[in-house]
Amino acid sequence: MTSSSAPNGCPRARPGCAGLLLRWQVFRDGTTHIRAECAACGAFVRYVRQTPEAIRRAGPPPTPGGEA
Ligand SMILES: [Zn+2]
């Protein structure tokens, strides 16, 4: 079994996988989280803490309950 993974932690670990894309995600309970996706293939990598830098990279946070 191979435990190798992409440098960015992408579970797919494809040859081109690199970089992380941070996006906001709203859970069903209305809480907002920042999820990191592989910038190459879009696979979910992990949730990240909402540090100022992470928030800046994720862009404007969604308004809870704003869009049904
Ligand atoms: Zn990937």
Image (spheres, rainbow, N blue to C red):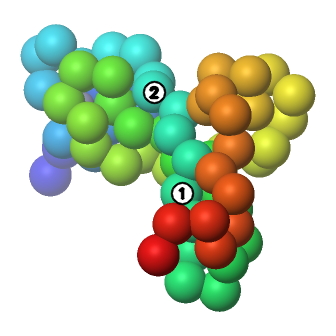
- Give neighbour class at mark 2: few <14, some 14-19, many 20+ (Cα, 10 Å): some
**Amino acid type, callout 1:** Gln
Q: Is residue 50 visible?
A: yes
Q: Position of residue 61 (x, y in %)?
A: 69, 44
Please, which residue is most extreme toward the right here? 52
Query: Compared to 66, does 63 lie above or below?
Result: above
* Residue 5 location, quadrant: top left
Q: Residue at x 77, y 46 (%)?
A: 49
Return the residue nearer the eye: 46 or 61: 61
User: Which residue has dot 1 on it?
Assistant: 25
Q: Quadrant of ligand 1?
A: top left
Q: What's the CA distance linking mark 1 and mark 2?
A: 12 Å
**Amino acid type, callout 2:** Leu
In the picture, measured across the screen, residue 41 lies left or right of residue 63, that is left
Query: Compared to 61, does 7 lie above or below?
Result: above
Q: Is residue 4 visible?
A: no
In the picture, measured across the screen, residue 55 lies left or right of residue 44, that is right
In the picture, measured across the screen, residue 55 lies left or right of residue 1, that is right
Disc nearest the viewer among 1 and 2: 1
Q: Position of residue 7 (x, y in %)?
A: 40, 20
Return the residue nearer the eye: 11 or 33: 33
Q: Residue at x 33, y 15 (%)?
A: 18
Query: Compared to 46, does 10 lie above or below?
Result: above
Q: Residue at x 45, y 27 (%)?
A: 21
Q: Residue at x 33, y 22 (%)?
A: 39
